[in-house]
């Protein structure tokens, strides 16, 4: 790609900085909040198996492709699609792919921020000792009271949005790289401690069984779609986040190897969250399918009961909020980069406008847990609808298009040059996965859901 049009945005200081940032984007509420609760809703083991297969066969090849597209153009997702379509001499309709990503990012962040607000509020609850010696019913009461109050949810949602936009306004390198270096080790240590606590409950093996013993009779076609959507969501794929991060990646960094590290770390954190949570669920006779409140209704029981639980509770929710922050900046970065690079906004101004729009949209999610809980579209409240449309539809469709573009539209010599893999077999394997396996798999899941298969 020619370098005549200079990119106006930043670059990672090193390969390690990219790994940290991309892992930061991948590891978030998706792993610790969403993975356990949708696993609970979808019957456990079989769902987890489909999810893992999707990560391996669809997620990783697409992550390599998406990073590659960004790195090749060194622009925001909208511009990336314009430039690469031109380079490949392809149809202009491919431009829409960049747009869809920008829109999906804003839609996801609108509800993501509300849930991250819950986690923020729980730091305070942990600090004031609310969980101390509380049983499952009391913990559930705390949660129900909290989400029943729109004012409280709005307060925490607003706080989280302001924090996100503060980091984004400073630019990608400064805020992000630093916070990640501390966060990742802390998160791992806390997860290990939580797993250790889960091992002390008498339901440890029941939890493991639930998570890893597949019972395919529990798998509906919608579960399969949800598992695939989760693979995209958790790896931050299909909407331009990884593309925009890839665009800050210096040439010469090996993309494929880096991707394996990121996807591996992401998967480990999700599984650890599951291993920590389900034993607590069963030990307290809770229901695994109790929905988005699951971690807020289970982990505090552990914090309330264990020695050192006060400090651990605080640390856990602090880490969760930071993990959510490093994901939310990735969600909003595509639209901000586009406003700055294409619309001539200053970074600050871009942050104010995109942040305001996202905040406003987030009110829909806030109210879906209380005053508008009965407002339903297609049997789903606003939060559920946003989640379904983005994670289950937009991300897989975006990912499918990225796969087709990288596998079929871009010239082989260009993808080969950009990926620059040391061995030909590695490239060939990726090429087959991205051209045939990933798009076909996504396509079949969709056919299955609409009842054709
Ligand atoms: N991967 C993030 C998580 O699991 C969510 C996310 C999705 C972030 C898409 C960026 C883009 O929490």
Image (spheres, helix red, strand yellow):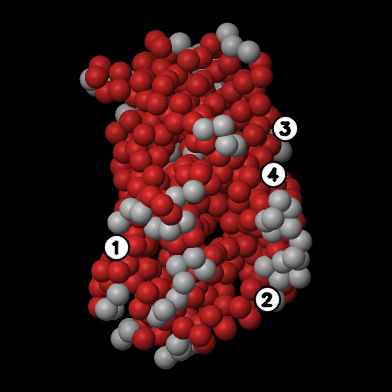
SS for callout 1 = helix
SS for callout 3 = helix
Write the residue at 47% across / 56% down.
Answer: 42
Q: Earlier in the sequence, mark 4 or mark 1?
A: 1
The residue that mark 4 highlights is 350
The residue that mark 2 highlights is 148
Q: Earlier in the sequence, mark 4 or mark 2?
A: 2
Q: Nearer the viewer, residue 416 or 429?
A: 429
Residue 255, position as x, y percentages in the image: 35, 30
Determine whether, in the image, residue 430 is placed left or right of residue 373: left
Q: Earlier in the sequence, mark 1 or mark 2?
A: 2
Residue 132, position as x, y percentages in the image: 44, 89
Neighbour tally class for label 1: few under 14, some 14-19, many 20 plus, Cα within 10 Å: some
Q: Nearer the viewer, residue 414 or 302?
A: 302
Label 4 or label 1, whichever lies nearer to me, is 1
SS for callout 4 = helix
Within 8 Å: ligand 1 and the Cβ of disc 1? no
Q: Which label sits on residue 209?
A: 1
Determine the CA span between mark 4 and mark 1.
48 Å
Determine whether, in the image, residue 252 is placed left or right of residue 35: left
Pointers 1 and 2 in contact (CB under 8 A)?
Answer: no
Neighbour tally class for label 3: few under 14, some 14-19, many 20 plus, Cα within 10 Å: few
Q: Where is 194 relative to 380, above or below?
A: below
Neighbour tally class for label 2: few under 14, some 14-19, many 20 plus, Cα within 10 Å: some
Write the residue at 49% across / 69% down.
Answer: 294
Q: Earlier in the sequence, mark 3 or mark 4?
A: 3
Determine the CA span between mark 3 and mark 1.
53 Å
Write the residue at 61% across / 78% down.
Answer: 144
Q: Which label sits on residue 343?
A: 3
Q: Where is 384 relative to 260, above or below?
A: below
The answer to whether one can see residue 70 in this image is no
């Amino acid at each position: 790609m020619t370098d005549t049009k200079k990119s106006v945005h930043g670059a990672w200081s090193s390969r390690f900085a990219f790994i940290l940032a991309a892992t930061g984007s991948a590891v978030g509420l998706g792993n610790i909040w969403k993975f356990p609760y949708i696993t609970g809703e979808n019957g456990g083991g079989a769902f987890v198996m489909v999810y893992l297969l999707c990560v391996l066969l669809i997620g990783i090849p697409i992550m390599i492709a998406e990073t590659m597209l960004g790195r090749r153009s060194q622009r925001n997702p909208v511009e990336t699609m314009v430039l690469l379509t031109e380079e490949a001499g392809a149809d202009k309709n491919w431009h829409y792919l960049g747009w869809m990503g920008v829109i999906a990012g804003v839609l996801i962040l609108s509800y993501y921020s509300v849930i991250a607000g819950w986690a923020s509020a729980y730091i305070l609850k942990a600090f004031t000792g609310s969980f101390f010696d509380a049983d499952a019913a009391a913990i559930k009461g705390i949660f129900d009271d909290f989400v029943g109050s729109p004012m409280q949810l709005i307060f925490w949602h607003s706080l989280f949005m302001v924090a996100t936009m503060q980091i984004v306004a400073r630019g990608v390198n400064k805020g992000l790289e630093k916070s990640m270096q501390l966060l990742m080790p802390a998160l791992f240590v806390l997860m290990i401690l939580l797993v250790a606590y889960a091992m002390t409950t008498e339901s440890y093996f029941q939890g493991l069984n639930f998570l890893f013993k597949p019972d395919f009779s529990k798998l509906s076609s919608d579960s399969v779609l949800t598992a695939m959507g989760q693979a995209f969501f958790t790896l931050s794929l299909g909407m331009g986040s990884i593309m925009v991060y890839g665009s800050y990646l210096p040439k010469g960094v090996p993309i494929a190897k880096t991707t394996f590290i990121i996807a591996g770390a992401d998967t480990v954190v999700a599984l650890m969250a599951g291993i920590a949570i389900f034993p607590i669920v069963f030990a307290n006779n809770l229901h695994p399918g109790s929905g988005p409140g699951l971690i807020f209704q289970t982990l505090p029981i552990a914090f309330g009961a264990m020695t050192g639980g006060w400090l651990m509770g605080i640390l856990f929710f602090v880490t969760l909020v930071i993990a959510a922050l490093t994901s939310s900046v990735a969600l909003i970065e595509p639209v901000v980069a586009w406003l700055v690079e294409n619309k001539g906004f200053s970074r600050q101004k871009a942050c104010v406008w995109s942040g305001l729009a996202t905040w406003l949209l987030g009110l829909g999610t806030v109210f879906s847990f209380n005053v508008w809980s009965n407002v339903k579209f297609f049997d789903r409240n606003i939060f559920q609808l946003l989640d379904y449309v983005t994670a289950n539809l937009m991300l897989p469709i975006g990912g499918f298009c990225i796969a087709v573009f990288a596998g079929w539209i871009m010239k082989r010599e260009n993808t080969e040059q950009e990926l620059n893999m040391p061995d030909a077999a590695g490239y060939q394997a990726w090429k087959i996965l991205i051209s045939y396996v990933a798009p076909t798999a996504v396509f079949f899941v969709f056919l299955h859901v609409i009842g054709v298969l």
